[in-house]
């Protein structure tokens, strides 16, 4: 139960609803206990009549009729109160589920890039859906039936004790066996539930990756191999599920057996006590049997409730593992910052924690508003890492990054990212309309502004040729579009944001040189008052930049303007001549 203590704050938040549920539960149990007492009194009345103890038939019939009416009324009231109990406590669990899902989702968004490198999407989805669902079953049904069982046990035992302390003691003898059985089975359920949930996350992650990469699966014709892998995982999941179900199945028979033993004890011991004159009426035995049977469902539900609690604890433990992770990148400033766009790197060294690879080594440069910095270099030279540091997806290992002469760690993180437009190398589009994907950069943008941004990104002519034009629904990750079209929609999304800092991460790699030239020309006017950093493998994209730096293994090996670098022997000139030659061959 240690892991479930995390949920106590929600019980405090909904304390009035929770306490109201407890009061209604107590009232429902009190009204439900009138039935055994009235039946016992009815049997006593019949006994007295059969013994001819000056009791008239009319009086007996009247009393029996009154008892029947009272049983009917109290049963209806108890049923209505039970309905209110469910409406109070089960609805509370839905509120807690809503709050917990939002808490987990919001925490996911705060976690740093490293977290998402180390955890699979399927596992994240399973925790926010399956695990939260298990926890809700604890907050709702498990808590409700636990309260119901505890209150019913307390009230019933008090009633039984007031009638016959001795018979009460004998009828409760099987309870220690019940407690021991619940403890042993619950421990095994907790163990097997943890294994099952872990395996379910693995299965979800595998399925998510297969569906996302279905084009690769089909292209390599490995459907059969993946089908076997999935079948193996589902077989393992089935085994773990069956293992859990087998243990769960022990609860019901165990509970019913022990309740049956209690009934036998009541009949045998109560019968002997009646014979010995220790109890006055057979009605007392009937009352006890009814009381014991009233405990049948609460006792039988103990197994189910215990299973719910153990499964919820296993799920909450998995949730707590993520909820207790502290983001490495967090907002350290509560002040609002007006970002102009000056960027400075001072002796920056950066090492990825997960791989221990040093991507940047002692990097220094400066970019002012209205300037464009182009970054070229081989694959893995650290180009994209610079953009990640500017948008503060990571913090430097050594050295400083400054925004408007202010340490980036001291800049309000929300203001920083609101003033940075990023076009990633791998263009990610959502399963929504093209228009909404572009408006993702500015949700308040008008349709005219969306069209204008698309024109600047040289994708408008493609879009209007689609049947539904800007209302065309894209498949997952923008699969409906070609690679070049996805990149250009992604560029339009960044342009419509109109942020003072624009970061372009090799976002023209999938377009032809003619389209590239058209996009760069439209960006010239757009970027005249913005700070732009352009990562590319093409000299054609970089040649008009204000400054150019060449990276190799995380270090700056060349820097200057296009003309300056072209006059130098080195990487830039070699790359220029190579790409110029390739262009001439193509033409």
Image (cartoon, rainbow, N blue to C red):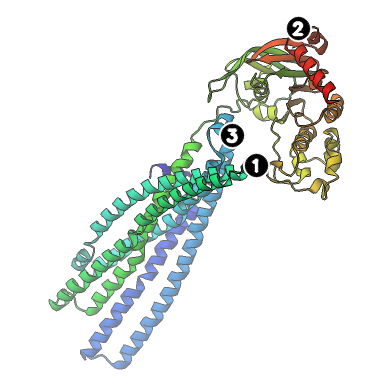
Q: CA distance from mark 2 to mark 1?
A: 43 Å
Q: Is residue 468 above or below residue 83?
A: above
Which residue lies under the disc numbered 1?
Answer: 219
Horizontally, residue 173 falls left or right of residue 490, namely left
Horizontally, residue 203 falls left or right of residue 455, namely left
Q: Position of residue 116 (x, y in %)?
A: 57, 34
Question: Disc number at residue 73?
Answer: none
Q: Is residue 540 above or below residue 188?
A: above
Which quadrant is home to the C terminus?
top right
Query: Going from the N terminus, do you reach mark 3 or mark 2 first?
Result: 3
Which residue is rendered at x = 34% and y = 85% of the image?
64
SS class, disc 1: helix
Q: Is residue 48 above or below residue 125?
A: below
- Closer mark to the observer between disc 3 and disc 1: 1
Confirm whether residue 528 shows in the render. Answer: no
SS class, disc 2: loop
SS class, disc 3: helix
Which residue lies under the disc numbered 2?
Answer: 569
Query: Going from the N terminus, do you reach mark 3 or mark 1 first?
Result: 3
Question: Disc number at residue 110?
Answer: 3
Horizontally, residue 21 falls left or right of residue 540, namely left
Q: Position of residue 151 (x, y in %)?
A: 36, 60
């Amino acid at each position: 139960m240690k892991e479930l203590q995390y949920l106590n704050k929600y019980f405090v938040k909904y304390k009035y609803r929770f306490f109201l549920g407890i009061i209604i539960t107590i009232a429902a149990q009190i009204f439900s206990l009138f039935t055994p007492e009235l039946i016992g009194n009815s049997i006593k009345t019949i006994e007295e009549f059969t013994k001819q103890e000056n009791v008239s038939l009319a009086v007996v019939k009247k009393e029996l009729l009154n008892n029947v009416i009272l049983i009917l009324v109290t049963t209806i009231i108890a049923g209505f109160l039970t309905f209110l109990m469910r409406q109070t406590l089960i609805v509370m669990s839905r509120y807690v589920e809503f709050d917990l899902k939002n808490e987990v989702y919001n925490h996911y968004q705060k976690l740093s890039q490293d977290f998402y490198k180390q955890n699979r999407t399927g596992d994240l989805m399973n925790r926010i859906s399956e695990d939260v669902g298990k926890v809700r079953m604890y907050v709702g049904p498990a808590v409700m039936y636990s309260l119901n069982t505890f209150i019913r046990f307390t009230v019933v035992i008090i009633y039984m004790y007031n009638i016959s302390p001795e018979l009460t003691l004998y009828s409760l003898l099987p309870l220690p066996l019940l407690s021991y059985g619940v403890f042993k089975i619950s421990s095994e359920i907790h163990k097997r539930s943890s294994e099952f949930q872990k395996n379910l996350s693995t299965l979800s992650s595998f399925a998510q990756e297969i569906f996302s990469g279905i084009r690769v699966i089909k292209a390599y014709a490995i459907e059969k191999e993946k089908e076997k892998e999935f079948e193996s995982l589902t077989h393992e999941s089935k085994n773990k599920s069956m293992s859990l179900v087998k243990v769960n199945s022990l609860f019901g028979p165990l509970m019913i057996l022990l309740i049956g033993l209690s009934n036998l004890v009541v009949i045998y011991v109560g019968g002997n006590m009646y014979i010995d004159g220790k109890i006055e009426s057979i009605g007392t035995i009937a009352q006890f049997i009814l009381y014991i049977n009233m405990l049948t469902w609460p006792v039988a539900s103990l197994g189910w409730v215990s299973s719910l609690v153990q499964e919820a604890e296993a799920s909450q433990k998995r949730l707590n593992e993520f909820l207790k992770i502290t983001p490495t990148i967090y907002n350290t400033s509560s002040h609002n910052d007006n970002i102009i766009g000056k960027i400075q790197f001072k002796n920056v060294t950066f090492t990825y924690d997960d791989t221990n690879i040093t991507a940047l080594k002692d990097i220094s440069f400066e970019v002012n508003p209205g300037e464009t910095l182009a970054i070229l270099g081989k694959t893995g030279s650290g180009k994209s890492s610079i953009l990640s540091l500017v948008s503060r997806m990571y913090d430097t290992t050594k050295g400083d990054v400054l925004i408007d002469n202010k340490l980036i760690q001291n800049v309000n993180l929300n203001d920083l990212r609101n003033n940075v437009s990023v076009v990633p190398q791998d263009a990610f589009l959502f399963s929504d309309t093209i228009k909404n994907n572009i408006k993702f950069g500015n949700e308040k943008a008008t349709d005219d502004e969306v069209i204008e941004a698309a024109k600047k990104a040289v994708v408008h002519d493609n879009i209007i040729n689609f049947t539904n034009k800007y209302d065309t629904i894209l498949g997952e990750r923008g699969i409906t579009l070609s690679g070049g079209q996805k990149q250009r929609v992604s560029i339009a999304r960044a342009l419509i944001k109109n942020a003072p800092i624009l970061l372009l991460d090799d976002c023209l790699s999938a377009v032809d040189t003619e389209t590239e030239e058209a996009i760069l020309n439209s960006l010239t006017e757009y970027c005249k008052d913005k700070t732009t950093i352009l990562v590319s493998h093409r000299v054609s994209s970089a040649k008009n930049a204000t400054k150019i730096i060449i990276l190799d293994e995380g270090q700056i090996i060349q820097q200057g303007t296009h003309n300056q670098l072209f006059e130098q022997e080195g990487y830039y000139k070699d790359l220029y001549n190579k790409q110029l030659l390739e262009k001439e061959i193509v033409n």
